[in-house]
Amino acid sequence: MSAGDTPKWHRYLRFWRANVAADVDDELAFHVDARTQELREAGVDAAAARARALAEFGDVERTRVTLRAMDEQHLTHERRTDIAADLLRDVRVAVRGLRRSPGLVAVVSLTFALGIGVTTAIYSLVDAFLFRPLPGAYGKELVALGRIDAEIPLPHVLSFPDFRDYRADTATFASLMAFTSRIATLDNGRGADRLWIDEGTANYFSTIGLRPLLGRTFLPGDDDGVLGHPNLVLTYKAWQRRFGGDSSVIGRVVRINDHPMTVIGVMPAEFHGVLPVLDVDGVVCLNQLWPVSPQVLEDRRVFGMNIIGRLRPGVSLDRARRAVTLEAQRLERAYPTTNKNVGVMLVDERYSRPSISVSRITPALAAVFMTLVVLVLAVACANVASLLLSRVVGRGRELAIRAAIGASQWRIVRQVMVECALLALLGGLGAIVVAAVAIRAIASIHIATDLPIRWGVELDGRVLGFTAVVTLLAGIATGLAPGLAARKRNLSGLLRSSAGNAGVRSHQRLRSLLVGGQIAVSVVVLVCAGLFVRSSSTISRMTLGFRTDHLLLVSTNLPTQRYDSTRGRATYAELVRRVATLPGVRSVGLTRFLPFGFERDNLSVVPIASAARVPANGFSYFDNVIAAGYFDALGIPLLEGRGFTDRDSARAPRVAIVNDAFARAFWPGQPAVGKQFHIDGGTGPVLEIIGVVRGMQDLIPGETPKPYVFLPFDQSYREEMTLLVQTSGDPLPLASAIRSTVASLDASLPLFDVRTMNEHLRNGQGMLFTRIGTAFASVFGLLALVLAMIGVYGVVSYAVTQRTREIGVRVALGATLPGILGLVVKHGLRLAWSGVAVGIVVSFAVTGVLASILYGVKPHDPLVLGGVAALLTAIAIVACFAPARRATRIDPITALRAE
Amino acid sequence: MAARAPAVADESADLDLLKGTVEVMILKALSWGPMHGFGVARWIRQTTDDVLQVEDSALYPALHRMEHRGLIAADWRLTENKRRAKYYILTTKGRQQLRARVSTWDRYARAVSQVVHATVQPS
């Protein structure tokens, strides 16, 4: 035998190496036995022979241990190098194979890149909203408390006295803090910076368990006493941007709202404020930021506190819910005038984002998005699997030969799967690029407010980890079907078949199933997209009850420290007068709030001399403070009485204008002008109604207008107002003229949120979800459509190749051109329609969830369903075009001779 | 020294030399044909007339080490007495190694011999 026959001894090696320990034992035992035997043959007696053999050997035990260790180590090393070498060989073969089909590589990696990239982008968004905990040691265990009452249909913020009562329940809460966000002005030496400040209880940071980067945070009691602890903790961003990252800022006294505050700390970069979508500049304690209003903190009718807390260890969310419900009932009994019918809801803090008021919608919306994502990803994977499957079938002969010359089944499967993994990797890299672009697009969505909104979407380690996992899963998922196909193939049969692809019918069926499935998924996604688009267009066509065109909105804020109410009123009046004289301006109004804005205020109203039954604490309605040509600019008709005039000054009797819904509610069938009502409860000031206007929609598009109260600016001064400018032409070019008009009054006034009414509405409350939904569902829909088209093309094109001979025979037997075309297109349509049928059934289940965020369109809108079906039919026909053309060109002679 | 034996240089020079010597003897033993560990030990004992005492407990680690390095291969076979024993076989690499070692050894031995039997006095 040849001793140098490496492969052979390798095989033997594998064989015996399996049990290292036993082999070492056997080898050593044999040696001792053999030597004993030899000595006995030389005449030594049995016992002595064995003893001598052992003595000659030396330390048997030590040798045994040494040999075992050596062999084990070698075996492990050998295995590792084997695997690495095999993998390397597989990769090399795969790269060589893929290089030969660049078209396939391009389509597959593009499909992966789109599917995984968009998935990553959406995940990053959902992650920012729902999954990523707040920074801080207790980020994951925080809960949020919201108020529920009969007047406002969504959960909202609490009053401070209520908060104090809930906080007293220390058996339930380990820590409970209240905060609210405020705007303040920082004197930067040259002018004024607008700051967003969280104003909270002293346990603001200790509740979330966050330590400062520099300096300290608040001490217990820092929120006691008015202006007693004027301390400011900066966020990292504000520290960098406004103080140049100077670490000597600790201890520095800065002027905020014209009052001194001491910077005591800087928070780490991951802290942006407790509300994850808001980028605040700093945090102060309650009662420390001038102007202070300690009486507000004692008023149960004023709710403005966001409540975040942490449960005592061992207290379940359910138990805590029962506890706060009991407390709410106690408060109802103790304070019937303010807390009647007021309940609370306790949720995981992550479900209270971006604000407690949407806590019921956010998880549903996120679920819809994630479902869309998974569906699109599934389509992408199915498509890739289908393409690769056809590749495996196409390579049937090659694989059969490889199997025949000794490649094991596992090896062939592995080869195919390595190919898929490589493609997935390529796609994953592309996906990062797609995701980066998509994330930038998401982050640029503007919301109708001057809040420093932070989407929080970023391509960080968490998100990239997600991409990696998804890529891995996608690679395995898509590799499985072709891999199994390669294994299952009747390889010997293939070799015999001259065409090299016998027995492909079952795979063709599998592919058809995959493509049918992805058409079904596309239908679901497109139906969602269609519903969103219909919903948006309904909103845009909806008559909201006010003019939306030719309106420019500009907001400003007169700093309280320099403008008292008298000077403020005069300044605004002068501003309105000057803007009204600008060329191109038709009318100018002033308003505190805008319909569909994110801010609003409510008023408790007790009507006088009304037949309506009035609860003790009155009715709570939204109100607004307006001046000048507000109704003119918005085109809201006056139904009765008059508008506000100079007569309704600060010293004159207090007046109000109400909408028709208000008038109807209290004085049906009577003129409301001249009627009176109390505000701020039954003992508050009395207002006389001087006019009635037509109601407009304010909160939810399509709603029936709710009772609404307008107060004259002269009698209810507000620092922050929005100019409402009706223009004769395009409103935006007027912005610079208005800017200089404001500057001519006071150059240091902050001017913000310059936009048209249409822009405001597009980004406004009520429209935003629909708008985001439309954007995402449309992108997904388009993606799904492209993928479905590739899928249909793949299957039909492959079928034409398979049936070349059959088609040749048909042509030879006299089939006409339209007949052949019909044959191919019918195949595509059969696929498309079965997918559409399944998809429509599935979409009924999915779109039910959407009902709550759709306007003016039913989840099973026939137009949308019909449109989607027609679209997919058209797409299927287009996808059949190229294969059909090829089929008509089949020459019967060549086709038959090829066999 | 011009050509050093390619021994594992992990311990003292003495041990190196010893290891190298053991390996050369094993290679030589196996050049006669497949042999089990006991056979190798017996051949060395008989050939050196018990002058070189290679302890069995040192022989086996050397055999395994050489096997891992691919100088020899192993194979379980039956002896004439129908007992299963691990036979070692010289590989191509081992054969080359043996040739190299033998020539190195010859030069080394000649050099040492020339020194110890030198007749020329240092000038």
Image (cartoon, rainbow, N blue to C red):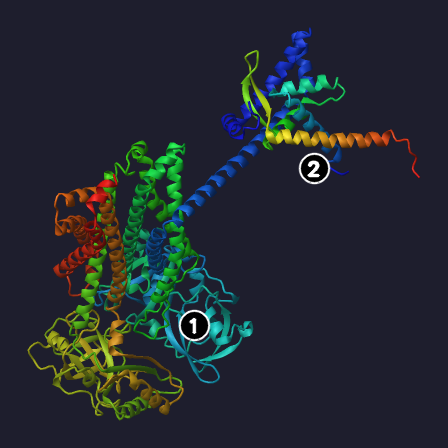
What subunit carries mark 1?
A
Image position of A289 (left or right of A587) = right
- Residue A751 location, quadrant: bottom left
Residue A50: x, y in percent?
A: 65, 13
Q: Which one is in front, A845 or A291? A: A845
Tell me what residue is drawn at x 24 percent, y 54 percent.
A789
Q: Which one is in front, A424 or A49? A: A424
Residue A232: x, y in percent?
A: 47, 73
Amino acid at dot 2: Ala
Q: Which one is in front, A445 or A117? A: A117
Image position of A166 (left or right of B3) = left
- Residue A736 location, quadrant: bottom left
Q: How many neighbours does mark 2 have within 10 angstroms: few (below 14), some (14-19), or many (20 or more)?
A: few
Element on which disc 2 rests? loop
Q: How many neighbours does mark 1 have within 10 angstroms: few (below 14), some (14-19), or many (20 or more)?
A: many
Element on which disc 1 rests? loop
Disc assigned to residue B9: 2
Tell me what residue is drawn at x 75 percent, y 35 percent.
B13
